[in-house]
Image (cartoon, rainbow, N blue to C red):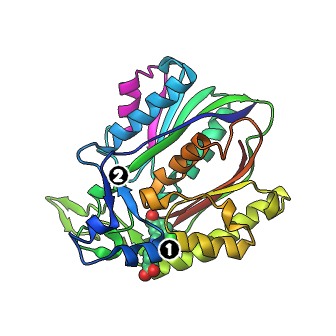
Amino acid sequence: MFAKITAAAHACPSHIVSNDQLSTIMDTSDEWIFSRTGIKNRHISTGEDTSDLAIKVAQKLLDQKGLDASELDFIIVATITPDSQMPSVAARVQAAIGAERAFAYDLVAACSGFVFALSTAEKLILAGQQKGLVIGAEVFSKILDWSDRSTAVLFGDGAGGVLLENASSTPFVIAEELRTDGSRGDKLTSGATGVHSPFAQVDGPKASIQMDGRAIFDFATRDVPKNMLSVLTKAQLAVEEVDYFLLHQANSRILDKMAKKIGADRHKFLQNMAEYGNTSAASIPILLSESIESGKLSLGINQKIILSGFGGGLTWGTMLIQL
Ligand code: 4VN
């Protein structure tokens, strides 16, 4: 048996902040932000933490399938903005929904987190696990430097996820390639803690997000198209045979360049960054859930989908899946 996504859901804070609203608290404008990124609005938490959003997603996934939480074998949450290091967000979800049999852990791979987590979950299913939740959840607003207009305007908060089940006679992952290049890790950083003890006082880089925008833009437009083409080559599939591309929603201009580089129809690159901004590990599952709701994607009809995440680490990865 193979893995299958049998439900998708998302949950975002209800408070929406527009570009115009942002321009009242920092020196920026709707025209600057929209023309460079395609972002119009972002949902920003007024108090909900990452686990609150992840728990809502988990509950929706169970409700959709009428599943009891005790039937879950595992819960993986991809996040770089956990409520705490311990307990993990996944452990908080496990307790809140009462998934008494499930093991649960967080996976840290920044904007590639959901793709890395889904890939890992598929291997758990192939090894015999029956049902698990894979969730991407972020409250990015709490790690932003709200005085840095070059990064603060890009991000938003949200969560999305899927229920993965051992339920299919057709393969789920057709081909995949996950990558990391830690030697370029300093181009996109957050959450440094430093070493503080009676024996050492060492400050690391700043805890808020720091990004070399040019370097990350170049990374995304060079390494990710190569990665997607490599996966298509492994699968012996032509670009035209892919039904939709669901990529990390970092920036609409970056998606334009990627589509051009691989020779794909830009209309097949789904996007929702106008409404949510960049929600890091949550962006792909939110897009997946919305695209199923809107009817663009349907579970169980073998649509061929490319999922690609890319970001801090540096990490990037592509999965070619059949829905
Ligand atoms: C992946 C990417 C980005 C990202 C990088 C650069 C960028 C987003 C730089 C040029 C600037 C507009 C914004 Cl590709 C961020 C992450 C983090 O999740 C991951 N925007 N831009 C301009 O002046 O045009």
- Rendered residue at 46%/32% (across/down): 58
Query: For the residues marked 2 and 1, what is the alpha-carbon distance in whole angstroms?
Result: 23 Å
**Quarter of the image with the N terminus in it:** top right
Given the image, on which type of amino acid does mark 2 rest? Answer: Thr
* Circle number at residue 242: none
Q: Quadrant of residue 210?
A: bottom left
Q: Where residue 320 sits in the image (x, y, percent)?
A: 72, 52
- Magenta stretch contains residue 48: no
Check the image and name the residue furthest to the left. Answer: 198
> Foreground mark, 2 or 1?
2
The answer to whether marks 2 and 1 mark residues whose Cβ atoms lie closer than 8 Å is no
Question: Residue at 80% of width from left, 31% of height from top?
Answer: 169
Q: Is residue 102 magenta?
A: yes
Q: Secondary structure at mark 1?
A: helix
Residue 139 lies left or right of residue 228; in this view the side is left
Q: Label 2: how many residues lie within 10 Å, few (<14), some (14-19) or many (20+)?
A: many
Magenta residues, start to end: 88-106
Of all residues, the one furthest to the bottom in this rendering is: 214
Q: Amino acid at mark 1?
A: Ser
Disc 2 marks which residue?
81
Residue 136 image position (x, y, % from top left): 47, 46
Picture quadrant where residue 218 is located:
bottom right
- Residue 183 is marked as 1
Mark 1 residue's CB less than 8 Å from ligand 1: no
Query: Which residue lies at the image location 39% right of the left edge and 45% below the top edge?
Result: 12
Residue 73 at x, y = what percent? 54, 26
| Above/below status of 55 relative to 219 | above
**Does any portion of residue 136 appear in the rendered image?**
no
Q: Earlier in the sequence, mark 2 or mark 1?
A: 2
